[in-house]
Structures are given as C-alpha cells and as structure tokens.
Amino acid sequence: MKNILLFSPHPDDNLCVAGAVRKLQKKGYQFYEILFANGDSGGNLKNSGVITDIRDKEFEKASDILNTVRSYKIGFSDDEVQYSKKLFYNLIEIIREIQPAIAFLPHPDDYHRDHKEVSSIAYDAIRAADNSFKFELGHRYRIPVSLYYQGLNPLNQVNILVDIEEEFDFIMKLVRVYSSQMTERMKQNLISKPSLAGYYMRVRYAEAYEIPKNLPLYPNGVLSDLS
C-alpha cells in the first residue's frame, strides 16, 4: 500500500493539497496528516477556547471526508510552532513508520511564521529520516517524492501541475466544512489559485507544486499516478 504524508501547520491547510490527495486515493493511496497548531487564533471569533473547539471539530469532519488513516496532532498554539530536537526526532519516527511514497510540506517562503517553521523542520526530518542514525526511531527511509505546496504566497517556481478538475467539487465540500475560516477573501484565494494554475495547464483547475532543493525525485510511479 502506498501512503501520502501531509505536514499541515493549521487545521485547514489540507485544502492546499486536497485535489492531489483525492486523485491519489482513487488509485489506492492512504492518507496521513501531521497537524502542528490547533488554530486557536484563526477565524472570526475572539474567544480562543471556543475557536479551538470549533476548528478541531472542523478538522475531524474534514479528516472523515478525506478518509484520513491517522492524524498526528502536535498541539502548538497558533504562532508558537517551534523547532526542537524532540519534535525533529518525532517527525523522523513518523516518516520511518509510515514510509510515504509522497510527502507534501509548506513552502519556506510562505506568509505565516508557522508555515515557515513547519517547512524547516519537515524538510530537515525528511532528509534525516534517510540517514544512518537514531535507529531506535526506525529503519532509515527515503521519501521518493517530496513537494512544496502553495499557501497564500506564490511558489518561487512551479515544477509540477496536477489537473484537479474532476476533484474540484470534492475540494469545495471540504471548503464548506471549514466555515469558521471562509471569508470572501479566503474563498477568492481558494478559487483563484487553481484557476490560474489550470490556465497554464490548459485545464479548468490545477494545483501547483515545487520540488524542494536537495530533495530530488526518485521514480516510483507517483508522478504518473498524479497525471
């Protein structure tokens, strides 16, 4: 069984890759997600306790729709995601346990500090999981395909476009789940990004991805499964 691993800074960031995930699931892939922050400062509500509970329920409902095998909740508050040795080792252990065929991580130049922090530690853990050390964390494993996904900021370069026209209704179903986050501006972002990527791919909707530096792709059939 081939697995997908997503590194998500916040509860609704799985929207950024939902099209590619759904396309791969149709071909038998299983989906795993690591959620770093609880979303306690997101949305339009001022009470952090209330919004945390709402966003957790939204995330769980979205996970059901995504048919997530397992979600790993790290539990940081928003804007407090921190790189640490303990977290670094934890991510290595998860990677070696799941052995994903493909991993998605946020871009290091994205707008939000949590996204940048998650990008940094996820990148380091992906590289370290293949090193000959800390064997108590599992056997070394090289993820064949790792890709940066697009947040609010444009990618530095687009290396891969994935046609998600057939998956777009599924994405909109997830968008409706995250109602606490869906301002008109956010809806515009979620439609305009795949529309622009689709324009360049000559399809209606697409998702854009960037290959991280020093994480070359190893042929394993994933890219053909995304076509």
Image (tube, helix red, strand yellow):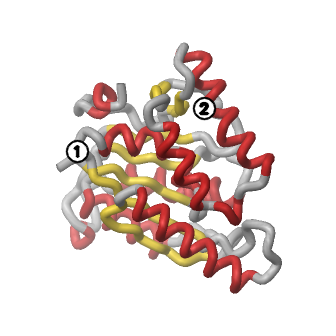
Q: Residues within 10 Å of mark 1 (few under 14, many from 20)?
A: few
> For the point 60% across and 25% down, which residue is it?
197
Mark 2 element type = helix
> For the point 41% across and 38% down, which residue is it?
215
Q: Is residue 142 visible?
A: no
Determine which residue is flagged by label 2.
194
Closer to the camera in the image, 72 or 81: 72
Residue furthest toward the bottom? 49
> For the point 37% across and 55% down, which residue is it?
128
Q: Are marks 2 and 1 in contact (CB under 8 Å)?
A: no
Q: Is residue 186 left or right of residue 167?
A: right
Mark 1 element type = loop
Query: At label 1, which amino acid type do we have?
Result: Gly
Toward which corner of the image does residue 32 lie, by quadrant? bottom left
Residue 4 x %, y %: 34, 50
Q: CA distance from mark 2 to mark 1?
A: 24 Å
Residue 211 x %, y %: 48, 33
Q: Residues within 10 Å of mark 2 (few under 14, many from 20)?
A: many
| Above or below 195: residue 173 | below
Identify the disc placed on residue 17: none
Determine which residue is flagged by label 1.
28
| Above or below 17: residue 74 | below
Query: At label 2, which amino acid type do we have?
Result: Pro
Q: Is residue 51 visible?
A: yes
Residue 78 x %, y %: 68, 71
Closer to the chain start, of discs 2 and 1, is 1
Closer to the camera in the image, 44 or 97: 44
